[in-house]
Image (spheres, rainbow, N blue to C red):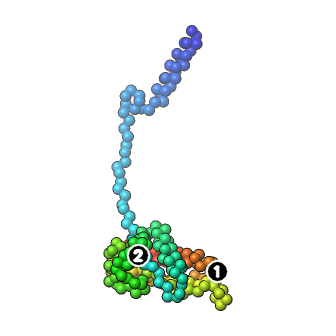
Amino acid sequence: MKKAIISVIIISLGSILLAQNAPDSVKAGKEKKIYEKPAVEKAEIVLPRIAVLDFVSLAGAPTSIVRTLSERLRFHLLESGNCAAIDAGETWKAVNDLQISRADSVTSGQLILLGAKLKADYIIAGLITDYREGDIEFKQHRLELMGKVYDAKSGQLARMDKVKVKCKKELQAMAEEAAEKLGKKLIKYCGK
């Protein structure tokens, strides 16, 4: 009997302690008011859309390097977070539809049409102006790139910049380094 009384007392004390620690909404039927912050609409950030035309080699660079440069430049622009690089396939299709033969001979009118078709703000055309593979005379690889940024609405040249890379790395690594350097230079001209 003593055990039963002790058990009842322990259960009663436990109930009292639980009731004291219960949230206000549970005690005496009180409702707890919850303050909700009003929803704040976030301003949508619209990044400039940039199309990168395939590079044109004026210095005899192999096709594999030319393709690497175009794709890596597109990647570095996108990676910067300051723009939206238009997909290579979409750009290639638009260039073919408009019958643009080479990025170094595109006209203002073609640039405006291309910009409208791709909904682009800027178009970048790249040139390989110097390319040397390491040999006895040069001892290291050399690559010089020029990038031209066009305003896609007006078709006018907005900015031009160039980079030079000399190294003993493998050719693809050199192309990667050159594209990254050119991308960093050109992205600052593509702001809104």
Label 2 sits on a secondary structure element that is helix
What residue is pinned by disc 1?
168
* Residue 95 visible within the image: yes
What residue is pinned by disc 2?
92
Q: Residue at x 65, y 90 (%)?
A: 137
Please tell me whether residue 62 is drawn above or below residue 31 in the rendered image.
below
Please tell me whether residue 175 is drawn above or below residue 2 in the rendered image.
below
Q: Amino acid at mark 1?
A: Lys
Quarter of the image with the C terminus in it: bottom left
* Residue 80 visible within the image: no
Return the x and y of residue 89 as percentages of the image width and height: 42, 72
Q: Residue at x 52, y 76 (%)?
A: 68
Within 10 angstroms of label 2, few (less than 14), some, or many (20 or more) residues? Answer: some
Residue 88, picture quadrant: bottom left
Return the x and y of residue 2 as percentages of the image width and height: 58, 10
Query: For the view shown, which residue lies furthest in the bottom direction?
Result: 137
Distance CA(mark 2)–CA(mark 1): 32 Å
Q: Residue at x 39, y 80 (%)?
A: 150
